[in-house]
Amino acid sequence: MAIAQPTSRPANPRFSSGPCAKIPNFSLDMLSDAALGRSHRAAVGKEKLKAAIEETREILGVPADYRIGIVPASDTGAVEMALWSLLGARKVTMLAWESFGSGWVTDVVKQLKLDAEVRTADYGLLPDLATVDFNTDVVFTWNGTTAGVRVPNADWIAADREGLTICDATSAAFAQNLDWAKLDVTTFSWQKVMGGEGAHGIIILSPRAVERLESYTPAWPLPKIFRMTKGGKVIEGIFVGETINTPSMLAVEDYLVALKWAKEIGGLTALQARADANAQAIFDFCDQKDWIANLAEVAETRSNTSVCLKFTDDRIKDGAVFAKAVAKRLEKEGIALDIGAYRDAPAGLRIWCGATVETADVAALLPWLEWAFEAEIEAQA
């Protein structure tokens, strides 16, 4: 017999892994200072774009000699810009253990057709990082959004590397410790941990990456939205807020509001603590149950943002059908929205635990998750 419905409900049922929940107590009134109807090249537009860059640097602790730019097409655009602009000077090592990393493999191997060693791992695991050749350029995701598996740290990255490291950090930035000394190109989108609106990406370049840009010209033509140099020199304007194409000043304002909130609650340390608490609530729940488990098999590699879960009960006849039914049941009740596993990932659930989510909402969700599980077990019997 299915258990009774819990009495407490999450105040905010938004657990989507992107775009993600807005900051606590968000309202559209917070965006009243947006520079709407104004050119992003006017003084007011440039000022806000530059502020977004400077406050990103402050909160993330990005070194002063690293360049930060706001670029088109979200994290995808930022990664593509890096791959097409920087690769080809030397052999490439591609690391992939989930769908987005696999997508970058497709770009490098099938589109750019580069000499690349591809190292993969199944969902839930990391590839062997100990033997990566850092004479090559290395491309990897810090946090695998669709697998819930992250690199535990940057100790495996050589300090004296010859090649560049290109890191897709979109669901790690603002929630996990990024070791800037080990990263030459870092990309993310502000609609993840900061709950911002879509379409804009961030690219962060180390001095070594800038040196590559200015000393190497790819063999293929570059679309305008990928070009970061002119006349053999980096276009400095990109890194002070002169964007390549027209940004949404409403989305920029939304990001500035989120950055202000982050500073008010204590900056990066507080953001990480919130994500850690959210994820830990789920980890503890899974430890107490024998029918659900974390997809990440090694505890130190478990994501604190995109927590991916798998059902392990032997009574489940079709894992994909069952998981979708649980997610649909929770959505119908208004308890949890958009928590189905990513389409290319193993059957299960994915619960976003980034800093904009309240731990009390995660805690309120978990009894409902057990209720939905039992209801579906009964329904399929």
Image: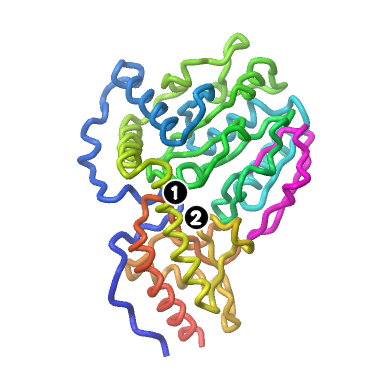
Indicate whether residue 282 is drawn in magenta. no
- Which stretch is magenta? 114-140
The kind of secondary structure element at disc 2 is loop
Q: Are marks 1 and 2 in contact (CB under 8 Å)?
A: yes
Q: Amino acid at mark 2?
A: Asn
Picture residue at 48% right of the left edge, 26% below the top: 69
- Which one is in front in this view, the residue at disc 1 or the one at disc 2? 1
Quarter holding residue 224: top right
Q: Mark 1 Cα within 10 Å, few/some/many (few <14, many 20+)?
A: many
Q: CA distance from mark 1 to mark 2?
A: 8 Å
For marks 1 and 2, the one nearer the N-term is 1
Q: Amino acid at mark 1?
A: Gln
Picture residue at 29% right of the left edge, 20% below the top: 44
Foreground pick, 183 / 219: 183
Q: Is residue 128 visible?
A: yes
Q: Provide residue 204's location: percent of width, then percent of height.
A: 53, 29
Picture residue at 64% right of the left edge, 23% below the top: 208
Q: Which residue is mark 1?
A: 272
| On screen, residue 377 above or below 147 | below
| On screen, residue 321 above or below 277 | below
Side (left or right) of 184 relative to 42: right
Picture residue at 59% right of the left edge, 55% below the top: 149
Side (left or right) of 120 relative to 151: right
Q: Which mark is residue 304?
A: 2
The kind of secondary structure element at disc 1 is helix
Q: Provide residue 102's location: percent of width, then percent of height.
A: 66, 47
Rendered-image quadrant of the N terminus: bottom left
Helix, strand or loop for the magenta stretch, by majority:
loop
Q: Provide residue 249's location: percent of width, then percent of height.
A: 32, 29
